[in-house]
Amino acid sequence: MEIAEKKQKRYQRVTEQLSGLLEQSSDPLAKMATVAAVLHHKMDGFFWTGFYFRRGKRLVIGPYQGPVACQVLDFGKGVCWAAVQQNQTIVVVDVNKFPGHVACDARSKSEIVVPVRDKTGTIIAVLDVDSTSYGNFDNIDAEWLGKITGLIYQ
């Protein structure tokens, strides 16, 4: 079985598991905590897995798994704000080549950020995942993490 197929199958299993777990609560914060924990422990290479909430012109840390992170990301800086401002998921193969990257932990080498939308389609948070390997994330991650974040406000 090729690597891409293995990744697809793992995401499918994780998404099914999360679907069942997230039915237990209607609280988005509880759902985000569960998503961060499951993804962090089930997916290969997820060094830091968590959420940042939009709070005016700042992104403020939410539930996460991994080492201590930046508590606040100032407006317009880093991959998280780029995802909000561009209204799309952003995959970064090498964070050192991303203009304005915010290095909360120097061990991070690649990153993916997925907007989290409420029922009206408004971006209220982002899912941010870092890896200690270059090129850990791709379109498969973008597709499945988009599906998973869609479960939060369902």
Image: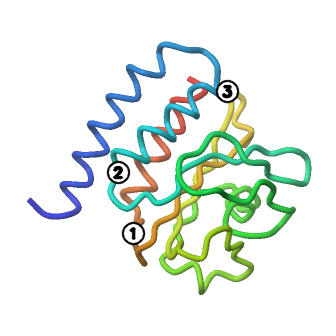
Residue in the image at 71% along x and 62% along y: 86
Position of 108 with respect to 101 (left or right) is left
Q: Which mark is residue 119?
A: 3
Residue 38 sits above or below residue 21 on the image: below
Residue in the image at 46% along x and 47% along y: 145
Residue 62 sits above or below residue 107 on the image: above
Gap in angstroms between the C-alphas marked 1 and 2: 11 Å
At mark 2, the secondary structure is loop
Q: Locate residue 14: give its quadrant.
A: top left
Q: Quadrant of the C terminus?
A: top right
At mark 1, the secondary structure is loop
Residue 77 sits above or below residue 69 on the image: below
Q: Position of residue 99 (x, y in %)?
A: 70, 83
The mark that comes first in sequence, 3 or 1, is: 3
Q: What residue did someone put label 1 on? A: 136
Front residue of 85/94: it is 94
Q: Position of residue 6 (x, y in %)?
A: 19, 54
Kind of residue at badge 3: Lys
Q: Position of residue 135 (x, y in %)?
A: 41, 75
Q: Which mark is residue 43?
A: 2
Front residue of 31/8: it is 31
Q: Position of residue 57 (x, y in %)?
A: 90, 54
Front residue of 74/104: it is 104
